[in-house]
Image: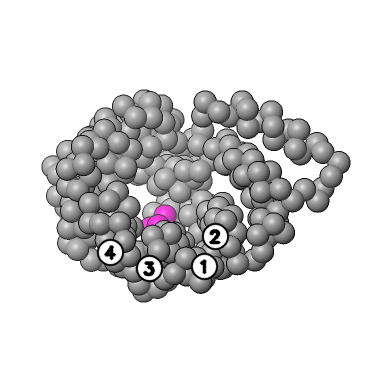
Amino acid sequence: RPESGTIWARGSRLLKTEDKSIAHARDSDLLNNLANLYGDLGDHPRAIEMHQRALRIREQVFGDEHPVVAQSLNNLAIEHNRPGSRERSVAEHRRALAIRERTLGPTHHTVGASHLNLASVLLLLGDYEAAQSHSERALELFETTLGRDHPHVSLAMQGLGNVLMLRGSLGEAKALYERGLARMEQRGGGEHVDVAEMLYSLGMVNLELGELSAAERNLQRAQRTHAAALGDSHASVGMDLKGLASVAYRRGETERARGLVERSIALLEPDEGETRHLADARFLLARCLRDAEPGSARARVLAEQALAEFRKDPVSAAKKIAEAEAWLALG
């Protein structure tokens, strides 16, 4: 971020002050920006600390019922959306949603954002019915308040598609991804990160449906778009490579799959925020290695590493846990 140097300098002065009861709105804004920088660097405990300080200041200055308090709660909830703290994330999202509904009205577009954010956490907790309900409400609000062509509508389509995919409604999920992608492309955002994310989602549902050519085409385009927007070494490129490796493995192209997933792991390992995707990649590599060399010691180590990560999120990773345990039981 080009402004990060200024934020660090001002933030350092603020954190060193002897006055621990700072109560200025501008200081809460600075703490919020500082928290975002810590989050970008992967220092999530520090990011949470900064967001909590910003929340306390905003509650002192504006009271408990104010949109900026809801914003701080939303930021905290996003940071808490990790294994072991997702219930806390849900509580913070629910409080933010309630504040926005009371202060801005139930049809405000930020209420839609709260519904969508809450749905994403509920999905990971395995509450698919509630996640779908909140996703549908977000899509309805965005279309009503912002118009059918607004970028938020496409994001809500993707969120709802993610829920439907995990519920097994693959055809419906695919249709939503395709509609969302078409609207993004109509707005001329063909090289935007959001387009790459939609292409990745579409490619993965293609894979689940057995549409391997379509999956490869969409994942390759996602990879090119992510690389153009974020650089060749970004973790998102690693996710795309993992998807392409899965396509190759499904086709029986084990050596090609191994090469792709090795590259994927190299990109995913440095990013602490992509541990679940890294676990998926390690388990895929383990299968490639065992297929080529039964009894491979490295394959077993990789599968055990993947299983340990899956077990940190036992609800959303239940299927993966069962697959890894069964695979390891085979020796």
Can you give x and y, in whole percent of width and height, for residue 62 in the image?
65, 59
Q: Magenta stretch: give its range.
A: 320-324
- 172 to the left or right of 30: left
Crowd class of label 3 (few under 14; some 14 to 19; many from 20; radius 10 Å): some
Q: Is the Cβ of the residue at disc 1 closer than 8 Å to that at disc 2? A: yes
Q: Can you say whether 116 is above or below 288 in the image?
A: below
In the picture, residue 259 is in which quadrant?
top left
> Could you say where residue 18 lies in the image, as x and y percent from the top left?
86, 41
Tell me whether circle 3 and circle 4 mark residues in contact (CB < 8 Å): yes
Q: Position of residue 203 (x, y in %)?
A: 23, 46
Residue that label 4 marks: 144
Would you name the residue on which mark 3 appears? 107
Q: Could you give the CA–CA distance between mark 4 and mark 2, rounded to whole angstroms? A: 21 Å
| Label disc, if present, on residue 103 of the rendered structure | 1
- What type of secondary structure mainly makes up the magenta span? helix
Mark pair 3, 4: CA separation: 8 Å
| Element on which disc 1 rests | helix
Q: CA distance from mark 2 to mark 3?
A: 14 Å
Amino acid beneath label 1: Thr
The number of callouts visible is: 4
Label 4 crowd (10 A; few <14 / some 14-19 / many >=20): some
Q: Is residue 85 magenta?
A: no
**Above or below 294: residue 164:** below
Q: Amino acid at mark 2?
A: Pro
What distance separates the C-alpha of mark 1 from that of mark 2?
A: 7 Å
